[in-house]
Image: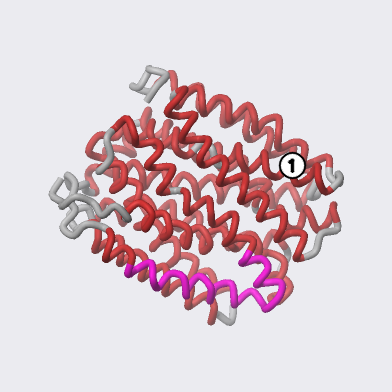
Amino acid sequence: MNATAPDRLMIPALSACNFVIGIGAFGIIGLVEPLGADMSLTPAQTGQLLTVYAVSYAFLSPLLIASTGKVGRRRIMALGFVIFALAALISALSPSMTGLNIARIMAAAGAGIFTPLSAAVAAGLTPENNRAKVLAAVFFGLTMSQVVGVPASSWIAYTFGWRWAFWLVFALALPCIWLIWTRVPAGLRFQPVTLGDLRDVIGEGRLMLAIGFTGSFIGAQYVLFTYIAPLLSSTMGFGGDGIALTLMMAGFGAVAGNILGGYLSDRFGWRITLTGLCIFQMLMMPMFSLLPVSVPVLICMVFLWAMGGWSFMAAQQVRLFALAGHRAPVVLALNAAAIYVGAAIGAALGGLMITNFGLLSLGITAGIGASLALAHLTLSARLSPLNEAHP
């Protein structure tokens, strides 16, 4: 590595940037109904925007990370955010779904550069015994976007129109470029990764199986999360305000989960943490097939579900970073890609279940998905070179 000491505000800056990434990536969940109404689309059709973003991220992120391995980290991270900002601008101005899909591909490319590198830079500059907490801090912004950004996007879309939600992302993205340029150390380079490293990682079955757990866990969550707005509208009679409030409570749960996940991983190790979270979600998500319930019960359900869903990231990333060695940027890019592969599969499966069995099938389907994630984790843990329980 060749770098000066990191600015003490670098981690908060990276977290703030991931906050904006989270709004741009997941804010579409709160836009499903108003955007669909404006363009005469069904919820399943509008949900495909998340699928496009997810598939694009999964394909582009590892390729872009590997092909830019010799470029200074600050420079390439700033470029990623420029692309992300332009995508938000195009989305706000787009007259059709074609333009929106193109913009979602661009947004995925920009986020696919920045987010994995933010994790790699933070982990690479942090002692091993403190990495889980630092990675949790870097992704705190991503989870905070669930508290503030996604509900705000939803409220803005219902109140002023969905285009204004993308204008918000564009406005927030511009200062992020400045933050990256002023807080990430100049000349920061780790051992370069190449397309050959990407090929080697993809060819390493045990490592890819470990990375793939991210996709199976997230996929189960997104069967339900992608369509939470129409589910609450149909079963609870919620309008825009009720949906925004519920998404905000999910965001508070996500923040609690992000903090809890870092603690659990450092205290109990990645395997116990991830196993417990899978079991918790297996029990939690089928409860959403029992709607309607009282509003206080719903709020409690949403908070606990989101907490369980967002607690896994620190443990999984510590596990993968230990497995990756100098290939960490590529592995973390593939892990981030797995998030969006899982989101794409979950969104597609959820849309299929709605079409064939109705909205109330989502909770049970998500619970079954969590049980499959547990089986995936058990198999990959047995085959992983890391046999110890603690990272």
Residue 74: image location, x then y, percent = 25, 60
Quadrant holding the C terminus: top left
Q: Is residue 132 left or right of residue 151?
A: left
Query: Circle 1 sits on which residue?
Result: 300
Residue 164 in magenta stretch: yes
Q: In this view, does 383 lie to the left or right of 285?
A: left
Quadrant holding the N terminus: top left
Residue at 21 percent of width and 57 percent of height: 185
Residue at 74 percent of width and 42 percent of height: 300
Q: What residue type is labelled 1?
A: Cys
Residue 2 in magenta stretch: no
Report the span colored magenta.
Answer: 152-178
Give the structural element (helix, strand or loop) at label 1. helix
Q: Give the crowd class for mark 1: few <14, some 14-19, many >=20 residues within 10 Å.
A: some
Residue at 43 percent of width and 59 percent of height: 16
Residue 188: image location, x then y, percent = 19, 53
Dominant secondary structure (helix, strand or loop) of the stretch shown in magenta? helix
Q: Quadrant of residue 307?
A: top right
Q: In this view, does 68 lie to the left or right of 58?
A: left
Q: Is residue 132 above or below residue 15?
A: above
Pick whichever, 142 or 99, lies toward us.
142
Residue lying farthest front? 8
Q: Is residue 57 above or below residue 85?
A: above
Q: Can residue 13 be seen in this view?
A: yes
Pick whichever, 54 or 28, lies toward us.
28
Residue 261: image location, x then y, percent = 50, 35
Pick whichever, 22 or 345, lies toward us.
22
